[in-house]
Image (cartoon, rainbow, N blue to C red):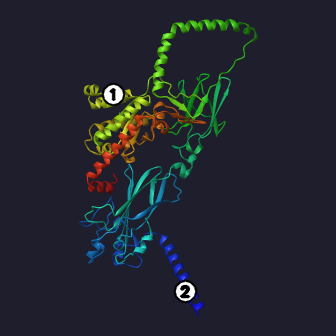
Amino acid sequence: MRVVRIRGQLVLFHVLTLSQYLSAREDQTAISPQNCSLRCVLQGGPDCEYCRINREEVEINHGVTTFGGCIPLPCSFFMVGQDSVCKHYTHAPRDITIEFLADQNPEYDNIIVSWKPSVYGIGFLRGFQVLLQALGGSHTACQLFLFQSNISLSASHAQRVYQSDPFYNLDLGSRYVVTVMALPAPVPEDSKDFYSRKDFSTQTCPKKNGLDHCKTDWYPKYTDVQQIGPDIIVTFNLAPPLLGIDRYFSKCYGDGLKDYTIKPDVTRNRTHSSYHLEGLKAGSNYTCEIAADQTDAVRKVFNVQVKGHKRETPLPLATWLPVAAALAVLLLILLLAVSSRKMCSHWIKRKEVFEAHPVSSGNDESVSPITRVTPPRLLICYCSDDGPAHVRAVMQLATFLQQYMATQVFLDKWDSLRLAEDGVLGWHCRRIQESDFVLVICSRGLRRALGKSEGGTSTAVIALIGEELGRAKATGRDISKYMAAKFEYSEEEDIPLELGFVSRYTLTRDLPLLFSHIHQVALYSPGAYLQIEHITQEGSAKQPAWAALEWSIHEAGMALSNHQESSGGEQDLCDARVGV
């Protein structure tokens, strides 16, 4: 009798365990929206447990709250006669995930958003609202989902996964933010606890379609350099015919800048082509790059070492070689005696520039990336609306660039006399024309200034840079003169749309990349890499100037954070609604 009782308990235990497992599996299965009408939701029909609500189906009445283009109806609209329920609201959803859908369109991405409800206040949950916004763009999409009016969820339903409808035609390689809001929302809306946000990026074109199907991302992967006598021949792989690329360009930096235009003959070879590097000096090292002749094309970087070559000399001429050598030595001594002062002065100037920015390579070869005696001229533009701490960080950056990155910096704070003579806008116009590079420090204050009808000098300067970039893009000219940067406390959306096509950097993390851009050198090459003293993590610990720059950026971030907290929650909630 006792054995039978034990067996019955074991069977009951297994049945309960299996039921719990099946219940958990059921809760983890994503619940998709149903295609039902608003009337079915209000009447509480059995086929309307979780419904999508089309905007055209909702009649907008007085007092309806809008949120980013969606129309979440007030709680009293669904819970007639149950005012006590409408006094509560559930907390923000959790575990937001983004799933990319497989499709045949190579230009866009499609996604589905999933989430779980919060256990707090789940008994009063009436539905969800999902808002999708493009960071730095105008794309906005919204979906509204409601439960039937007589449903009441329990704490166990917090493990359920709910899905949105698909969001279609999202641009590849773009940043988006999705906001999932629990309904009913608090009235007044003085809390962030009822919504959750998640930033994500869509797939890049190469990741979705493969590199050979992306014109703007394609670059030659294969390069082979051969020297036959004095001739330097470079062979590279051509772009697939479907991309329609028929011209290429190449540049070499070393003993000056060498430009090459390449027009392959595809009738002879459809996969590879070769071209000659002319005008390179024997015994010199060059950093070269090759890319499709397209705007903002990705460039393939490679190194070229030109070796000396010997020419065969006729036998009778060999008897004159000792005499020629002696004459050459005498001539060399004479030239050295005459021009010693000029040469010393010249090399002293070069020594001062190189000592201001020593460079060491990752292998034993001596690589000197700076090939110009005069440093490049850099104009720094910024907005002072973020406060004095932000301005101090900009000035500390300018000091560091000029002292340790061999760069001549133009900053309005350093040129007050000329600024008074020309005026603020006139000074910026002249410095933009005189500078080799223009670096715009992007911040929240700059973004807000551009959003005002009267943005002042910052708006005028950005508009001027935008016009210059527009003309360069229209004529196919290089736009590498202009760069955008942000400190670590700023966001990607702080970068203006006018600078959407220029190179962007986060400081101080990307200082080596900024150095590479300004001095036009490659940080990496086959078997070697450049380590620039003072601006790498290894060398920065020894420099007080680096610590001062890091500390000024930290102070500016703390000051900006304290200012936002003291401004109250209403502005942050407004920002969350409009996606600022």
Compare residues 474 and 358 and report the one nearer the observer. 358
Q: Which residue is mark 1?
A: 430
Q: Answer left or right for 70 relative to 204.
A: left
Compare residues 30 and 416 and report the one nearer the observer. 416
* Spatial CA span between label 1 and label 2: 90 Å
Q: Position of residue 183 (x, y in %)?
A: 33, 68
Q: Answer left or right for 510 relative to 86.
A: right
Q: Position of residue 450 (x, y in %)?
A: 30, 43
Q: Name the front one of labels 1 and 2.
A: 2
Residue under the point 32% across and 36% down? 461
Compare residues 4 and 394 and report the one nearer the observer. 4
Residue 455 occupies which quadrant of the picture?
top left
Residue 144 occupies which quadrant of the picture?
bottom left
Q: Residue furthest bottom?
A: 1
Q: Check disc 1 and give the amino acid type.
A: Arg
Q: Which residue is mark 2?
A: 9
Give the secondary structure at mark 2: helix
Can residue 247 be seen at all in this image of the molecule? Answer: no
Residue under the point 52% across and 75% down? 21
Crowding near the residue tagged with mark 2, few <14, some 14–19, many ≥20 C-alpha atoms within 10 Å: few
Give the secondary structure at mark 1: helix
Closer to the N terminus: mark 1 or mark 2? 2
